[in-house]
Amino acid sequence: MVLGYRPALKAGDMAPPSGESPLGNRLDPHLSRYAKRTHGMTASEIRSLFAVASRPEVVSLAGGMPNIAALSMETVSSTVANMLATRGQVALQYGSGNGDQHLREQICEMVGLQGIAPHPDDVIVTVGSQMALDLITRIFCDPGDVIIAEAPSYVGALGVFRAYQVEVEHVAMDEHGLNPEALRECLKTLAAQGKTPKFVYTIPTFHNPAGLSQPQDRRMEILQICQSAGVLIIEDDPYGLLGFDGHIPQAIRSHDSDGVIYLGSFSKTFAAGIRVGWAVAPHGVREKLTLAAESAVLCPPAFSQLTISTYLDTQPWMDQIKIFREVYRERRDATLEALTQYMPEGTTWTHPTGGFYVWVTLPEGMDGTAMLPRAVTARVAYVPGTAFYINGDGRQSIRLSYSFPEPDRIREGVRRLGGVINEELKLMHTFGTLGVARPSVSSQGSTPGPDVV
Amino acid sequence: MVLGYRPALKAGDMAPPSGESPLGNRLDPHLSRYAKRTHGMTASEIRSLFAVASRPEVVSLAGGMPNIAALSMETVSSTVANMLATRGQVALQYGSGNGDQHLREQICEMVGLQGIAPHPDDVIVTVGSQMALDLITRIFCDPGDVIIAEAPSYVGALGVFRAYQVEVEHVAMDEHGLNPEALRECLKTLAAQGKTPKFVYTIPTFHNPAGLSQPQDRRMEILQICQSAGVLIIEDDPYGLLGFDGHIPQAIRSHDSDGVIYLGSFSKTFAAGIRVGWAVAPHGVREKLTLAAESAVLCPPAFSQLTISTYLDTQPWMDQIKIFREVYRERRDATLEALTQYMPEGTTWTHPTGGFYVWVTLPEGMDGTAMLPRAVTARVAYVPGTAFYINGDGRQSIRLSYSFPEPDRIREGVRRLGGVINEELKLMHTFGTLGVARPSVSSQGSTPGPDVV
């Protein structure tokens, strides 16, 4: 885990005194000058825990970092050398706001695997798909506007919605992802209040954090509900090519090019550090997105874009994706086996068929947020479930990410976690739920930090 | 000039029918869904002209692109190879939201040349300094808030202010940059209206577009005015190291670390395509900026950051800056000589001592915006003065950028421009000012496109 922006913390700082955020509460002479939207921008208190969790002795099952070691550094190096020799003057110069033309053509080919057939002009390259989320919210949402997101949902998206003062209505998931009945109910309730949501935000494939996928008929049902209600869908799909059985689910966007904005990323199929993602958007929307992108960063880095473009042109990138799949499948297996071995009765978890995450539901009465300081003390870290809800729900759940550590480390981490949960259970049985109460650590805050994505 | 995002245009499209923006007016089924801030996001009509201006037969004095050819591609290539060999796993991974720790230390050393002595924690690395402008406006400005900017001002900053629905009050410049008397007047007028500006945005060194620099006593006077009024200064300084005589002006930030946010960039001292800039900000502000940055892009590209970091560690970067200075000095000289040779009486221009730009004031009664289609037809392009004002002023001025073309091409471009101005003058003398009226091409719009920065 790469960490930088945090005041140095000692072990004793792990459970900071209530109200004393390591980022928020010092004297700031500019406090009266900030915009309204800035008042909600406070760092989540779990950041201080992750500063400790980044120590080598802690097994981190927290951060959703891709396993870059599975990519050959020689390949990257020769790709960059090749790129600079052939397109160096373009790579080092300003480019166009919506991204390199050739890369946008290559992205069209790539999303073809998910059944999407856009025109290269429909593609906007962004600084990671996080920037696409920011721009979409920027162009669609006024403060107080409502959007719908499944619960739990991607913590980085919730951070964006919060930053734009958007109200998030959560819709429950079942074992097949976003639940259509709950979506219908939510739309009905909003309509009764005279509210039309600006969009439905969903991750249909290898969901972060839930580790679930929507079957095709579920996707069609969700699309039809949104079409009937005249509501746009934001389909976030960073893990779509990382199915362990090699099957590539067809995107919702493949069935409707006007009503769905599709987001993709090279962070998990090549490297996160180049920060290249994209949106596939309807005509009018992509023009607004491009204008917003130019205002935000002028243009995405040509240096990164041309590197991935050259890589796609000259390297067997699908073979590399197969290597990544195998790396993650092996780690998913280690995680599930260890969970079976070490989790006490009453603990349940999802069985992901792709992606990075397992969603663990703790025994009745337990609180994953309150347990985190104890887990970090026992040298294992995770992200508490509350981080993935806008409203404080999710206390009984935690997210385990298996993408980065070696399988043996994962097993050791899950073993330590099992020990912590058993300890909590013992306390709870002896003293009742009050027995596990302790100074609460809130995971609420405008951004999670890049280490828990 | 690298162009991409524009509908294909034929030569006959150069003066689009009034109201028919090539980006704005097609049928958009999502039109009713956009946020209020998005309604002002329309593409400037001059974009279509620049699509034509990018043809090789046109001498473009429009885009402020760095002269990347002056940087050795072998050096860049070996730097990247070295970087991947030593820090490859970090370069390809997510990083921290405020940027790489070592790079922030190097930036501290670099800004030391301008008299600034920050702590590395005060530095936030951004995707070009454009992103720093976006984040600063995001955290400080509610819709309807007022900021002050010298006139003319950087077109990309005006685009950001417009995107956040900020009211810009222009303050006049004189031959030494932002005029203190005018600043005092503006603050007084605003105070009388009960308005406190959120900040004063200024480019004190080698100003874009005016080509002027504030002497040290002017900087001190502006700082004192802002300190007295309790108004923050945003000091934008992408060209500070590019003085032709090697002199490096001391930054306003060197005199006040609490009241000034300083912005810098590697776009002009290394390469624009890596998109690495930074802000040096007071404690509370940099924490808000980091949270906003994480929400916007998670983290800046480690790949770019570690490339520039390795370059600074291993290459004689100050020698390269001296090469850049020489390249731009030679082009500045060619521009000024050609202006003296080809401009008709009544035309005046600034004499930049660094940076990329000359600001040309046309003879009385002429309109640089209306003249642009004729200039492009005569195979020379510039940016009309109106682009650098929020309020439609600047019609009598144009910006010439000499950074990119070869000196001979610059001379030829200025020669062509002289011909166009003479033609306009002839028309004007024959028919009066009405003689030069034609379908107006507005340069107003939320963003200028990356090619006119």
Image (cartoon, coloured by chain):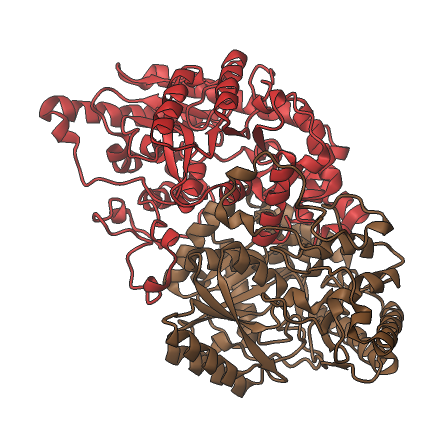
Chain colours: A brown, B red
Q: Residue A436 in the image: state x and y as whole percent.
A: 81, 69
Q: Residue B197 in the image: state x and y as whole percent.
A: 43, 32
Residue closer to the observer: B304 or A434: A434
Classify A226 as above or below B286: below
Residue B93 seen by the camera: no
Classify B160 as above or below B36: above
- Quadrant in the picture for residue B212: top left
- Quadrant in the picture for residue A448: bottom right
- Outermost bottom residue: A217
Residue B383 seen by the camera: yes
**Residue at horizontal 72%, vertical 45%?**
A5
Classify A71 as above or below B147: below
Q: Residue B260 in the image: state x and y as whole percent.
A: 57, 28
**Quadrant position of the N terminus of chain A in the picture:** bottom right
Residue B305 left/right relative to A378: left
**Residue at horizontal 30%, vertical 28%?**
B394
**Quadrant position of the C terminus of chain A in the picture:** bottom right
Classify B44 as above or below B249: below
Residue A2 left/right relative to A202: right
**Residue at horizontal 57%, vertical 75%?**
A113
Q: Residue B50 in the image: state x and y as whole percent.
A: 36, 42
Residue B54 left/right relative to B287: left
- Outermost top residue: B217
